[in-house]
Image (spheres, grey):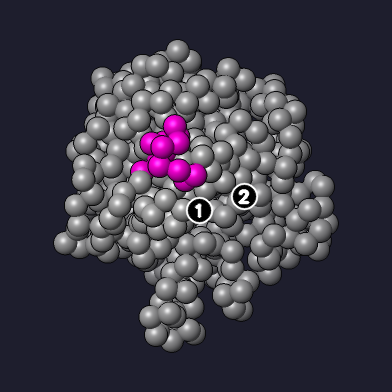
């Protein structure tokens, strides 16, 4: 297996608007990120992924960009950004930025020109048609918006305010490559590429027999040509790392994006877990891991994550955010950090932050949730029932402000937070975690240190056992003479793990566990709720 610095890295995702506000405007800012860099370094992360902080009207929290070469005032200034980058590098860490190039904001000067007339030179920077097809977008019932001025529809995979760029136009591609060089020349270490497999569109936009399944938006012919061109013209000239956000893919498609011989991307986020498993499902999860390992190992590099700014926090979604909050947070951490692939920590995950429930739809900010709510209510569905049905997966579950301490607004802001703080901040906060040696934070720190000191966690093979067990997840990682057994009880019951004889007798040393060792326990392998252990064999 080819060794690379990024394969060995642990990424910490900073959703800066919810991280730390230093100027009292209620939004986190880049200065706040600078102030907490030591905290991130002490956790052990090597790479920071910063969500978009470019000029934007903020209809979709920075994913609608109106100026690719500036910093949004809420986040700070270009000077602050450059200082952030220097401070990250001074600590031996790296910084990757979000690259959002499937679409821009409708306020981007390119779009303002494009919509102004049919013969404007920028008309062809976006996708205009006389007729629309029956496709949905992620956020709206139609992927097409009629524009009266020129009597045509433009295409948008997300909100109406996020028109898709026309990647078939070579001028668009050159503009984007130039913009990428602008940031790379500042010294950033790579990109997380927003919905990057959506760039190529289906020829002719045929109607879909199943318009609700929006997978027609991605993986269309031409996508690999664009990514190879981007790599050849831009990426290969820098020592950088790229991770593509790639929905609707199987492992067979995945290797086409990240195959080491393909010259496209380094790794990907696939969404077989987060887009298709709403509540924990052991069977499906194990199957996904096995298929991705079999399909990708030795060919391309995978990523492991169980939440981010779009997906409800793991303890709330898959674990237990009440009596087993701490053990379940540690158990899923063990899982993510021991499965093959790069682990990602989403801010607040390292202290076991939970999802939120606000009183009414008016307290929410997430455009995906609000649009779904409006659409359902307009179609005659009961407002309260609709609201309830949207709570579990609302993106605001993970976007609440970072909980630093038990002072007002969790120490996040001295102003009015843009999104209400989760009321549980008095119990769950960083200050508390740092003062408790058994906290979730210190457990992450140990896991990350284990990875740094043991290549088996990075490059070791993956061999699952007890594959049909509904509660126990057990597997080996092996490299050279090193062989580890990871043993997890992903359930709220005590469960006896009946290990095969040869496995049990070969365990030599416990490297990590999330419950204290019990002297004289009736059965060594009776696992407590959400118990996690790592053994050396
Ligand atoms: C990605 C982002 C998400 C955003 C969307 C449109 O999925 O992670 O937050 O809304 O792309 O850019």
Picture layout, residue 233 above or below residue 443: above
Q: Is residue 408 shown left or right of residue 206?
A: right
Q: Is residue 158 magenta?
A: no
281 or 96, nearer to the observer: 96
Q: Secondary structure at mark 2?
A: loop
Using the rendered view, name the quadrant where residue 141 is placed. Answer: bottom left
79 relative to 410, above or below: above
Q: Position of residue 222 (x, y in %)?
A: 25, 32
> Toward the viewer: 56 or 414?
56
Residue 17 in view of the camera: yes
Q: Residues within 10 Å of mark 1 (few under 14, many from 20)?
A: some
Residue 514 seen in render? no
Q: Is residue 298 above or below residue 253?
A: above
Residue that extends furthest to the left in the rendered view of this protein: 209
Quick check: 152 above or below 502? below
Which quadrant is the N terminus positioned in?
top left
Between the residue at mark 1 and the residue at mark 2, the CA separation in whole angstroms equals 9 Å
Q: Which residues are magenta?
A: 115-127
Q: Measuring from the top left, give residue 365's x and y in whole percent.
A: 59, 64
Task: Give residue 161's mark.
Answer: 1
Q: Is residue 209 left or right of residue 292?
A: left
10 Å crowding of disc 2: few (<14), some (14-19), many (20+): some
Main SS of residues in magenta: loop
Total marks shown come to: 2
Residue labelled with disc 2? 57
Q: Residue at x 60, y 51 (%)?
A: 58
Where disc 1 sits, the SS reads: loop
Residue in the picture at 57% in, 24% down: 183
Residue 119 shown in magenta:
yes
Q: Is mark 1 within 8 Å of ligand 1?
A: no
Quarter placement of the C terminus: top left
């Amino acid at each position: 297996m080819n060794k690379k610095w990024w394969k060995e890295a642990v990424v910490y995702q900073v959703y800066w608007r919810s991280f730390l506000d230093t100027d009292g405007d209620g939004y986190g800012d880049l200065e706040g990120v600078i102030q907490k860099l030591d905290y991130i370094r002490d956790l052990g992360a090597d790479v920071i992924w910063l969500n978009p902080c470019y000029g934007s009207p903020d209809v979709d929290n920075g994913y609608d960009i109106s100026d690719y070469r500036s910093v949004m005032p809420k986040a700070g200034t270009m000077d602050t950004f450059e200082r952030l980058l220097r401070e990250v590098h001074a600590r031996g860490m790296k910084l990757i930025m979000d690259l959002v190039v499937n679409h821009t904001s409708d306020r981007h000067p390119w779009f303002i020109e494009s919509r102004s007339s049919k013969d404007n030179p920028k008309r062809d920077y976006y996708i205009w048609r006389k007729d629309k097809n029956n496709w949905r977008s992620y956020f709206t019932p139609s992927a097409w918006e009629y524009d009266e001025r020129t009597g045509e529809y433009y295409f948008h995979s997300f909100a109406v305010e996020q028109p898709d760029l026309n990647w078939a136009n070579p001028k668009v591609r050159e503009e984007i490559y130039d913009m990428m060089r602008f940031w790379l020349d500042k010294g950033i270490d790579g990109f997380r590429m927003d919905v990057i497999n959506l760039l190529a569109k289906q020829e002719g936009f045929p109607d879909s027999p199943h318009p609700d399944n929006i997978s027609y938006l991605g993986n269309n012919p031409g996508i690999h040509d664009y990514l190879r061109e981007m790599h050849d013209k831009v990426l290969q000239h820098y020592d950088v790392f790229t991770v593509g956000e790639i929905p609707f893919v199987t492992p067979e498609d995945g290797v086409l994006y990240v195959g080491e011989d393909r010259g496209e991307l380094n790794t990907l986020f696939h969404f077989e877990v987060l887009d298709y498993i709403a509540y924990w499902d052991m069977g499906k999860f194990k199957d996904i891991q096995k298929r991705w390992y079999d399909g990708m190992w030795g060919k391309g590099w995978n990523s492991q994550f169980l939440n981010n700014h779009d997906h409800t926090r793991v303890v709330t979604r898959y674990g237990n955010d009440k009596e087993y909050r701490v053990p379940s947070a540690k158990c899923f951490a063990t899982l993510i950090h021991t499965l093959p692939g790069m682990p990602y920590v989403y801010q607040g995950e390292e202290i076991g932050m939970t999802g939120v429930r606000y009183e009414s739809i008016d307290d929410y900010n997430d455009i995906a949730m609000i649009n779904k709510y409006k659409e359902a209510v307009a179609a005659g569905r009961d407002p309260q029932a609709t609201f309830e049905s949207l709570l579990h997966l609302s993106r605001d579950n993970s976007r609440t402000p970072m909980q630093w301490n038990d002072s007002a607004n969790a120490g996040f802001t001295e102003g009015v937070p843009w999104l209400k703080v989760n009321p549980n901040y008095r119990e769950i906060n960083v200050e508390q975690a740092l003062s408790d040696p058994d906290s979730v934070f210190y457990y992450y720190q140990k896991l990350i240190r284990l990875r740094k000191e043991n290549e088996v966690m990075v490059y070791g093979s993956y061999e699952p056992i007890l594959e049909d067990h509904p509660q126990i997840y057990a597997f080996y990682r092996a490299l050279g003479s090193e062989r580890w057994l990871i043993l997890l009880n992903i359930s709220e019951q005590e469960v006896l793990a009946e290990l095969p004889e040869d496995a049990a007798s070969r365990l030599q040393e416990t490297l990590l566990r999330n419950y204290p060792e019990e002297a004289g326990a009736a059965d060594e392998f009776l696992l407590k709720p959400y118990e996690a252990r790592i053994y050396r064999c």
